[in-house]
Amino acid sequence: MKYEIAVIGDTGSVIAFRGLGFTVVPIEDDTGAEGELYRLIDSKRFAIIYITEPLARRCSKVLSRYSAHATPAIILIPASNDSGGYAMANLKQSVIRAVGFDVLANKKEGGESKNE
Amino acid sequence: MAKRRVSPNRMELMKLNNELRTARRGHRLLKDKRDGLMQKFLEILDETLAKRNESDLLLQKAADSMALASSVIDPEVLMQTMQLSTEPLQVHAETRSIMSVQVPVFTLPQLEAMKRRESELESDNRDDNPDRGTEEVSEDNTGSFLGYGMVQTTGDIDIAFDALTEALKPLLELATLEKTLQILAVELENTRRRVNSLEHVLIPELQQTIREIRMKMDENERDNLTRLMKVKDMLVEQEIEARRKADERSRLAEA
């Protein structure tokens, strides 16, 4: 199946992706961000939707709703002005959901103890 | 524990035994599936973490280059440059199966074609005259995704776009890996729940019901046996009584 790629977020972070042939949806204010995301998903044109971390934090409901669907893949990217580590937190949540406890924390501790 | 209300007979016992056998087989299979999924999940988790770090670094590099470019170029020109539309990038979504879980695989035909062309050019360059090869590269190297002109832009923006193009492949791989991880996480959670409910609810419940039916049937058997013994005792008593009476009758007749 052929699809396109979309990217949604603040203008400064996402506008450059237009040059690569992505569909860019700049969002400046909070209102309507979820609506725009739903519009992109419902169009069924996009297999991957990249979303900046600050915006993803505000649209967490949409993200969790579509996490089990094969398409679209909603992937977090850092914003140029702020990368709050929300992508990592999201990943951690998936791990806890799957394994039952935080493997990443154990790995980190294991890595640190090895380094020590 | 919730008990099943079933009539204690052999038919029910046979049915429950079959159910228990199926539940145990299902439990074993699901446990194997859970272990297999867990192994795959942890492998993909490591890959995803590495890929996320890589793509974050590349995107940061691209953002820095873009910031540098925007400081040199007139913001209006920069925005116009960005607005110039290129062909929309087509991505192929195929599926592959991990432990019978369907996960998507995203590929970019344009990126692959570009790489193929580059490798062909490289091999041509090695084979042919190096001067001719260089010319061909400069002519053909427009295989990037750029859709802006060269008149009003500077080299900085080219560097920024190059950095972004470099981040494209890791970003695509990250999308495949993260989506796989999300789908596997949901499947793992469901499998874990199924295994737990079989292990802690269904199988003990079936075992308990079977034990109760057996006890009830044993009790019925003992009841029956006691009744039979009692009946036999009564019959023996009647026999004895009848014989005693017959003996008395014969004694009286003799007298």
Image: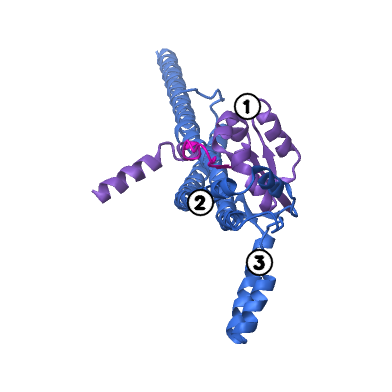
The residue singled out by tag 1 in the image is: A30
Q: Is residue B95 above or below residue B134?
A: above
Q: Whole-Å distance between the Cαs marked 2 and 1?
A: 27 Å
Q: Which chain is purple?
A: A
Give A72 or B168, whichever is nearer the viewer: B168
Q: Magenta residues, as a range? A: A70-88
Which label sits in the foreground, 2 or 3?
2
Q: The disc labelled 2 sits on which kind of residue?
A: Lys
Chain B is which colour? Answer: blue
**Residue drawn at x 45%, y 37% as measured from the top left:** A96
For the residues bearing labels 2 and 1, Cβ distance under 8 angstroms: no
Which chain is disc 2 placed on?
B
Residue B125 lies in the magenta-colored region: no
**Residue drawn at x 53%, y 46% as measured from the top left:** B181
The residue singled out by tag 2 in the image is: B61
**Residue drawn at x 64%, y 31% as measured from the top left:** A28
The percent coordinates of residue A22 (x first, y second) are: 68, 49
The residue singled out by tag 3 in the image is: B114
